[in-house]
Amino acid sequence: METILIDIGFEEDRIAILDDKNDLSQYYVEKKGSVRILNNIYLGKVTDVLPGMQAAFVDIGREKNAYLHIHDATIPGEKKEQEIKKLLKKGQGIIVQVTKEEIGDKGAKITRKVAIPGRNLVLLPYEQGIGISRKIRNPESRKLLKNEIEKFLPDGYGLIVRTAAKDYSGKEFEAELQYLIKLWEDIERVGTYEYPPKCIFEEWGITHKVLRDYFTKDIKELYINSKEEYHNSLSLMRKFNTSLATRMKFYQKKTPMLLEFNVISQLEQLYKSKVWLNSGGYIVIDHTEALTVIDVNTGKYTGKNEFEETIFRINVEACKEIAKQVKLRDISGIVIIDFIDMKKQEHYTELLATFQEYLNKDKTKTKVLGVTNLGLVELTRKRENKTLERYLYSNCNCCDGTGRRMSLDFFLLKVEKAIQRSVEHTSRKTFVFKVHPDLVEKLESNYNRMEKFQAFYKVNILFKEEPKISYGDFEILMNTD
């Protein structure tokens, strides 16, 4: 069973999900005051209609206009036209929902097919009918859930039953459905009297999203290191599921939570492109502008059986590790995997089936497309947010962005945890860190940020240049008080 850690910091909140062996399986970060627009609902204004692209651009109040494709421009009840110019007019106000965050120079991707997510149900205001999560595979369970919900689903609405719903009763479904319908009615009402562009619904923050989307009966424990956030979350979960609320715990140990559970050191491992397998084989992960390439190698593994069987076993082990790394690093878009060549077709068939099975555990839509003529396996993973790589890495000025080194955000996380640990165990008020000269320059240029840092922990922090220390590492000088 998994464990969830909610680490509330002074500058950012972090969510770590650990598997049954306390290995990091997912990690999310949200900066205080940061703006995330995924799943937000806007009253937008059509700025351009492009018949040749069968698309339109919509002003939702962001710096870049959002992109609306014809497939997402039609909602049930409207006459389906072949040309987008017959669906939308320049200057028209429409209610849209963000399905993909802004990435780089690209604006957000939006849809008119609004979906309001709850813990067990997803309300589809413009659809009709009931859909059941594919992860609920038992035919009898699917039938029972559909029959139960049909009893109280009003006409004119559609629903998707989420995976978490398999352990709930009809009474709980009905209460949640009424809440979602009331929420949609409020959103729709605001959309009738506001002027575009206007955000008319904001998605929940990261902490409550984790409680809604990830905190299920498969979670052994959930720890929160903030008393205020713990009580807020406890109150929310008592509305969702009282039995799960008993698994929530306020973390009170003196050692910072992410250090106690070895999360920081596991994050540092994500710097490395080479990931070793237990057998002695390894995979190499290489990111490019257009796609991610993963190479599987035998490494130190020789095996005790015939060569073909040895290769197959390494590839199967690599499948599990690749699925884990793709989810943990939040790799998205096109992924090409070069498994070790195998001669038997049945091995490829079994390998792809096993690979898809591991990938099915990922909440983000991921699909194996098959094997190319060159023997490469292709898969795609839906891109929704900025990747974890953007948090962990920053471009290096010395190599014009072709290499990577630790970002200032992640370096300060390491510093913060070192200070937390020391403050809990000592009375020290001054900390002198020996760091790489390039980092001193970055820290000095972020004076306001460091000032807030010191005020929050009520300590003095100094940084001293030390060229011999690797970029991203530090040493704390002793006897500074």
Image (spheres, rainbow, N blue to C red):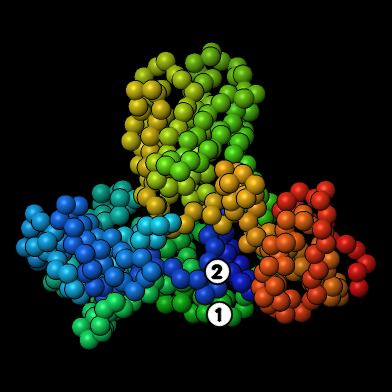
Q: Residue furthest bottom?
A: 193
Work out how far the residue at label 1 is from the one at label 2, CA to CA, in angstroms.
Answer: 21 Å
Q: Mark 2 = which residue?
A: 31
Residue for point 46% across, 71% down: 35
Residue for point 40% across, 57% down: 105
> On screen, 235 above or below 295?
below
Residue for point 66% across, 73% down: 449
Report which quarter residue 106 is drawn in: bottom left
Q: Residue furthest right?
A: 479
Q: Three-letter amino acid code at disc 1?
A: His
Residue for point 47% across, 27% down: 339
> On screen, 29 above or below 398?
below
- Residue 2 shows up from this direction: no
Q: Of callouts 1 and 2, which one flags the residue occurring earlier in the amino acid sequence?
A: 2
Q: Residue furthest top?
A: 306
Residue 303, position as x, y percentages in the image: 60, 19
> On screen, 401 above or below 216?
above
Does residue 222 appear left or right of residue 113 in this picture? right
Residue 399, position as x, y percentages in the image: 61, 44
Report which quarter residue 107 is drawn in: bottom left
Does residue 366 appear left or right of residue 110 in this picture? right
Question: Which circle marks residue 231 in the picture?
Answer: 1
Viewer-nearest of labels 1 and 2? Answer: 2
Q: Secondary structure at mark 2?
A: strand
Q: Residues within 10 Å of mark 1 (few under 14, many from 20)?
A: some
Residue 7, position as x, y percentages in the image: 61, 67
Does residue 232 appear left or right of residue 87 in this picture? right
Q: Three-letter amino acid code at disc 2?
A: Lys
For the C terminus, the quadrant is: bottom right
> Looking at the image, which is closer to me, 243 or 262?
262
